[in-house]
Image (spheres, rainbow, N blue to C red):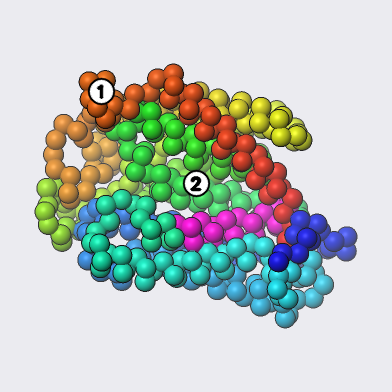
Amino acid sequence: MLSPEVMRPRQNHLPGREPVFWPGLFFAFAATSMAVGIIWDISWHTTIGRDAFWTPAHMAIYLGGALGGMTGGWLAFKHTFLAGPEGRDSSVGIFGGRAPLGALVAIWGAVAMLTSAPFDNWWHNAYGLDVKIVSPPHALLGIGMSSIIFGALLLVLARQNRATGGAGAGLFIYVGGILLTMVGVFASEYCFPNEQHAALFYEVCAAVFCGPLVALGRAGRVSWPATRAAAVYIGITCLMAWILPLFPAQPKLAPIFNPLTHMVPPAFPLLLIFPAFAIDLILRRTPQINGWLRNLMLAALMAAAFLAVVIPVQWYFAKFLISPYADNWFFVGNRIWSYADGPGKYRTTFWHVRPDRPDADLFGPSAAGLSWALGTFSAWLGLLRGGWMRKVRR
């Protein structure tokens, strides 16, 4: 079991001599490879179809997993057998060995990812193509990738919290942006521009984005940490949306209702930088507080601020994204459809919002209240997690 010394630095620690910077860079590269790979893989499925397991997108994903696992394994070996007193001060004990906490989490994530690879191949052979992004093997893969990214976050957090320089804080912001990118990928089924007038979109946003933004804002020791991490998320997603269509590709699976000649880009990212700014602003004016009731009240305030910004921003921006004005390389408005999506009016209308339809998902007072409740719970968990992350030093 984990040593109770996870969050307690020793007094003889020497600042400025932390052997964490290069492993942190390796972890950041691994996280980037996985984020690029998963967006690339979705584009591959929507453009070409699943023609083989050994696609470049899959290799990018598993390269990130292997690099994260090997870096974590090296840190575990080093801190167990080669580290002196300083190395032991930056690691935790588990089952007779030692390693930084982030390395242990990343090793577990790499094992989960490697397990998901043959499981995913078997799943496709048994059941055919994916109907949804979140299938059982993809869920296991997502857990593994998230664990590696969270492990990377813990590793750079330890450096940041020991105040040994700006590298740890910068890497924390970058890896936090990767974490938001992964959350955005796995929530993308509910975040199409055409769904952004329906109640479910705002409920999902409040539930999955509010907590991570609050945690990043609470744990970061630089100015405006959640806002900066949201900017990284937008930057990475935009780069993928602009770069992927540069590569020619054609569908290989029938039926083909939408002939394609280039890779399909992801939809334009959510404008999370605006609600992230609101959360940062509240946290800057609110000292760290104790007590579950006060934290719950603060979480309710931040959830309300999150929704007060997200609702008008995404409501009107979605109108723009499904209009002809967004049909260009920058906003990729009408270029996000797969080879199986034929032409039709549905591309330029909002879904699930007609009162005369049985599948209507109208956004009204009840949906707003549910979104606020989900956002409050998510933000409360984010406050708890962010407060704990500020104490991580090993």
Which residue is rendered at x = 57% and y = 31% of the image? 376
Quadrant of the image containing the N terminus: bottom right
Give the residue displayed 66% in from the left and 73% down from the top.
76
Residue 229 coordinates in the image, percent (x, y): 55, 44
Looking at the rendered structure, the secondary structure element under dot 2 is: helix
**Residue 126 placement, left or right of 370:** left
The secondary structure that most of the magenta stretch takes on is helix
Q: Position of residue 152 (x, y in %)?
A: 59, 59
Q: Is residue 353 left or right of residue 374?
A: left
Q: In this rendering, does residue 102 appear at all? A: yes
On the image, numbered disc 2 is attached to which residue?
A: 180
| 279 w.r.t. 381: above or below | above
Q: Nearer the viewer, residue 297 or 34?
A: 297
Q: Which amino acid, mark 1?
A: Arg
Asked if labels 2 and 1 touch by Cβ distance under 8 angstroms, the answer is no
Q: Which mark is residue 354?
A: 1
Q: Label 2: few (<14), some or many (≥20) within 10 Å? A: many
Distance, label 1 to label 2, CA atoms, is: 31 Å
Which residue type carries mark 2? Leu
For marks 1 and 2, the one nearer the N-term is: 2
* Residue at x 48% of width, y 66% of height: 112
- Total number of numbered labels? 2
Residue lying at the far front in this picture: please name it: 358
Camera-nearest residue between 299 and 39? 299
What segment carries the magenta color?
Answer: 142-161
Vertical side of 122 occupied by 202: above or below: above
Is residue 27 shown above or below 321?
A: below
- Which quarter of the figure is the C terminus placed in? bottom right
Between marks 1 and 2 in the image, the one whose residue lies nearer the viewer: 1
Depth check, front residue: 38 or 298: 298
Percent of width and height locating residue 160:
70, 53
